[in-house]
Amino acid sequence: MPNKILICEDDKALLSMICYKLSRENLGELKTVADGREAVKVLREEDFDLIISDIHMPFHSGIELISLVRNELKKNTPFIVLSAEGLETTVLQAFEMGANDFITKPFSPAELVVRVRRILNHKSGHE
Amino acid sequence: MNEQIQKWYGLPALELILIEVSILFILLSTCLVFFLLISRAVKNRNEKKRLILRSHFQEPLNQIIFQESFSRPDEVIPSFEFRVDELRSHLGQSKFAKQVLIDQLLELKKNLTGISSEALVATYRKLDLHLFSVAKFKGLQWKRKGQALRELAEINYQEAIVPITQLLKSNRRTLREESAVALIRLRSEEPLSFLHSYSGAISPWMEINIHHHLLALDQRKIPQFSQWFDHPTISVSLLCIKMAQLFRQASSLPALVNVLRNPNQEVAGQAAEALGEMEAYHYANEVAALAMSVWDKKNVALQVIKCLGKIGVDEKHSPVLKKFLSHPSYEVQFEAARNLISLGQEGRSQVQLFSNQEGQSFQGVIDHLSEPLLQ
């Protein structure tokens, strides 16, 4: 079964670019959401193999999404956080909440692919 | 005319005026409602158009970012050229479409690094969008000029340095500030060179931006701030002293000592603060030698005292600070006493001795110093 990846990003151009790259690399089935509220709804309804989320989004932040997944839904789905430069404290907070990795914007799409692949391989190795 | 209407309808003058005013009000309101409806419709239409254009641009942009190979059976066309042509066909001659594409390119660029980012810059140039941005300088709208400044700086279009430099003399403050920040970004080798000819004031917004951009620079490219310590514009001098302090530029220390003699109190005070914060222990004697010359300048005196408190040597500089205990300003007296105590044993004895000599008149300072919240 292909991996299911949820991408939460409010910047539509960036969202499209990430989807394009990940789909070209055949990394799995992609689902996208453009805000935190939509992300919460999708996370409650479906299971994913990986979540990639921006920190700052309308309605619910990436940190709130990690909290939802780890504390409320009690899932250990791998979580990659996208954050802007200079938000080191937020990144630390994300790790404390249970994020698995983070990428600082601006980033290289190739780096994102490497990180996604590593996490998915790690996950499938454990299963 | 009014008399005729009054005659025709037999209405009193006051009622007639009220009717006229009401009619005028209804007409104006109707016009306003129409104007709002039309502007709303135009805005909605533009937004829809923008979304359609963005979706058309996104696919070729994705392919450009990832530099995917492309070939056609009949002819070999480099993929980049092909995608750029595709974008060009969407653009046509529309200024609106060009602006949408520029916004989209910049949005993507700010999130990407490396070759992906370079591919977006190449696209911008290949489509001659830099000409579109530069043309905005010729317009009358300052907002468009500001927009062009940000676009050209973001894309690092070096050829725009000359027109941007001219905007440093703009009558509008926002444009002056934006052009200064754009020049810092464009001239990464000499980021603050615009200061040589800058006559405007440095606002807090500029200060934050300048600091932000300098932080992102390679440390070897940080300029020698002391070259602007004597700048005719006070805010430029202050900015450079603060930057020398924040970047702990040791090579600026000798010049900073000279700035203590600056006739402007704010500049001299800032220099004293910088010397203290930079822990310029080697220059403690120079600061002490100047201390008495700033007696009449309260703010400078305060900073010099704080500076000596940080970099001074107990036995050597306590006598200098002691003199300030008899300063007419309570604030200076208090600062001198506090810094004498922080210097060490000799300083504490000086305060005690002075307190014994002065008695009640100095008791306020002593009580203030023993305030638990200040400990």
Image (tube, helix red, strand yellow):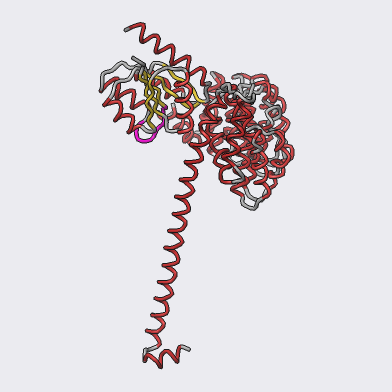
**Which residue, as the protein is rendered here, is positioned at the far front?**
B74
Question: Which quadrant would residue B79 be assigned to in this image?
Answer: top right
Residue at 44 percent across and 19 percent down: it is A102
In the foreground, B79 or B210: B79
In the foreground, A102 or A11: A11
In the foreground, B361 or B194: B194
Residue at 66 percent across and 35 percent down: it is B268
Q: Is residue B242 left or right of residue A110?
A: right
Q: Position of residue A104 (x, y in %)?
A: 49, 22
Is residue B229 located in the magenta-colored stretch of the structure?
A: no
What is the chief secondary structure element of the magenta stretch?
loop
Q: Position of residue B29 (x, y in %)?
A: 42, 67
Q: Position of residue B121 (x, y in %)?
A: 62, 30
Q: Quadrant of the N terminus of chain A?
A: top left
Residue at 74 percent across and 37 percent down: it is B196
Question: Which quadrant would residue B248 be assigned to in this image?
Answer: top right
Q: Is residue B59 visible?
A: yes
Is residue A58 located in the magenta-colored stretch of the structure?
A: yes
Q: Quadrant of the C terminus of chain A?
A: top left
Question: Which quadrant would residue B281 be assigned to in this image?
Answer: top right
**Which residue, as the protein is rendered here, is positioned at the far top?**
A125
- The residue range painted magenta reads A54-60
**Which residue, as the protein is rendered here, is positioned at the far bottom?**
B7
Q: Is residue B326 visible?
A: no
Q: B178 above or below A109?
A: below
Number of numbered discs present?
0
Q: Is residue B17 left or right of residue B170?
A: left
Q: B307 above or below B53?
A: above
Q: Position of residue B309 (x, y in %)?
A: 57, 25
Q: B277 above or below B154?
A: above
